[in-house]
Image (tube, rainbow, N blue to C red):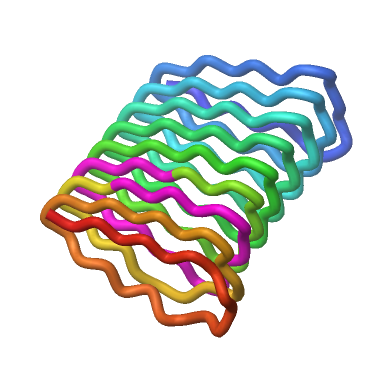
Amino acid sequence: SSDVVVVDGIDFDTVDIDSVSGDVNISVMTPDVIKVDTTSGEIQLSNISCGSVDVNTVSGDVQLKAMNSDLIDVDTTSGEVSVTESTSENFVISTVSGEVSFTEAIGIKVKVNTISGDVRFDAMDGNKFNIDTVSGDVKGNLRTGKDFDISTISGKIDIPEDGDNGVFKADTT
């Protein structure tokens, strides 16, 4: 069990980290690509501007703060995903047994798939949202939401109106 910490001020074109049982903490970087794969380790990425972020973890939480990226792709099993004060053209988040939360984030396209996990938005802004849950609730508030498509099986939806003339489609089973 070893932790990986990438210190401030060191830059690489590509950051590729594989860890079995250790935490990963990366901050203040501008690489083209960040790829992190862990089993049983927490991942914290902060103050990073890059082309793409690809995070995969089993039994570990993912915290993204002050990120700016064309693509942020996160896949977790038994771990929570928290996105705070971050901007991306494309957020793609998939979880099994883990909550997904966005706080003051901006995404042109936001795609979230959860099985047994809630999706929460707090002051989220975006153009196109596609949210699919099985046994998970979708709740929160949006600054704006132009196109919002939610599908849930055995979950409830609670997204207050944002005042814009967007499209809202909800399917529940």
The answer to whether residue 126 is magenta is yes
Q: Position of residue 48 (x, y in %)?
A: 76, 42
Tally of numbered tags = 0
The residue under the point 37% across, 22% down is 39
Q: Where is residue 133 in the image (x, y as percent from the top left)?
A: 26, 48
Seen from the viewer's position, the closer of residues 20 and 13 is 13
The residue under the point 60% across, 75% down is 143
Seen from the viewer's position, the closer of residues 129 and 139 is 129
Is the residue 157 above or below the residue 86 in the image? below
The residue under the point 24% across, 61% down is 137
The residue under the point 31% across, 63% down is 138
Quadrant where the N terminus lies?
top left
Q: Where is residue 46 in the image (x, y as percent from the top left)?
A: 68, 47
Quadrant where the C terminus lies?
bottom left
Q: Position of residue 63 (x, y in %)?
A: 52, 48
Q: Give the range drawn in magenta.
A: 112-132
Q: Is the magenta stretch mostly helix, strand or loop?
A: strand
**Quarter location, residue 57:** top left
Left or right placement of residue 46 versus residue 10 in this view: left
Is the residue 71 above or below the residue 111 in the image? above
**Quarter location, residue 12:** top right
The answer to whether residue 114 is magenta is yes
Left or right placement of residue 120 versus residue 7 in this view: left
**Quarter location, residue 59:** top left
